[in-house]
Amino acid sequence: MTPTREGAWELLVKYTKNPRLLQHGLAVEASVRGYARIFSEDEELWGIVALLHDFDYDQWPSVEDHPYRGCEILSEQGYPELVTRAILSHADYTGVSRQSRLEHTLFACDEMAGFVTAAALVRPSRSVLDLEARSVRKRMKDKAFARAVSRDDLRLGADELDLSLDEHITNVIGFMRLSAETLGLKGSL
């Protein structure tokens, strides 16, 4: 089976009804695709992995089920092991270590895309278009802001990409700006 973006999108919307989770999938997709371009990797495949990384979370959010249930569904549908392994590796508790550049990138973009989204939505403009890395770093220091996001994971993700935290934040913001309207982050600008 050759995965397609359209097939991945259909699967995502079949299992995910929460608009925020759909937005998150799109934000991670935009970010991972951006890195695929930088690294001269398969942008389509990387985007599909990113889009599907949490597709089972809305229905099965427990650590006993996510991302295992999703990977079972993907395997049944003929998705290659490269896809399921990357998805399993994005959650540390699965015990699947990150080895490939795709796996490190998915992990690095997952939490960062969510954090950048939250930082954009609290701006007066409600936009990623005027968001800068220094604003995101400032929000990271506020433990009450997006408290479920591990600051250690944000830093570790940048480290796994061999980037400074500022470079990684700037990259993710830039990638998300390209899809600001689709992500609902164009705001009032």
Image (cartoon, rainbow, N blue to C red):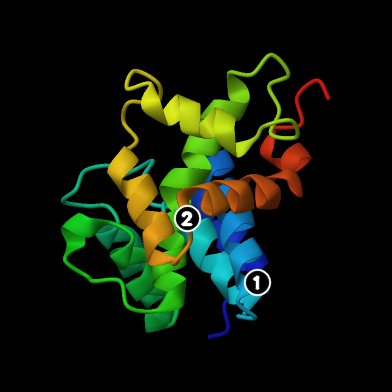
Would residue 94 appear left or right of 98 to someone viewing this image? left
Residue 182 screen position, x and y as percent? 73, 42
Please say if 18 is above or below 100.
Answer: above
Which residue sits furthest right?
A: 189
Which quarter of the figure is the C terminus placed in? top right
Residue 38, numbered label: 1
Frontmost residue, 16 versus 52: 52
Would residue 85 appear left or right of 14 to someone viewing this image? left
* C-alpha separation, residue under disc 2 versus residue under disc 1: 16 Å
Query: Of the residues under marks 2 and 1, which one precedes in the sequence?
Result: 1
Residue 94's image quarter?
bottom left
Frontmost residue, 56 versus 112: 112
Would residue 37 appear left or right of 109 to someone viewing this image? right
The amino acid on which the numbered mark 2 sits, given as a three-letter code, is: Ser
Residue under numbered circle 2: 164
Q: Is residue 17 visible?
A: no
**Residue at (30, 66) in percent of width and height:** 89
Residue 184 screen position, x and y as percent? 70, 33
Q: Secondary structure at mark 2?
A: loop
The amino acid on which the numbered mark 1 sits, given as a three-letter code, is: Ile
Q: Residues within 10 Å of mark 2 (few under 14, many from 20)?
A: some
Residue 109 screen position, x and y as percent? 48, 54
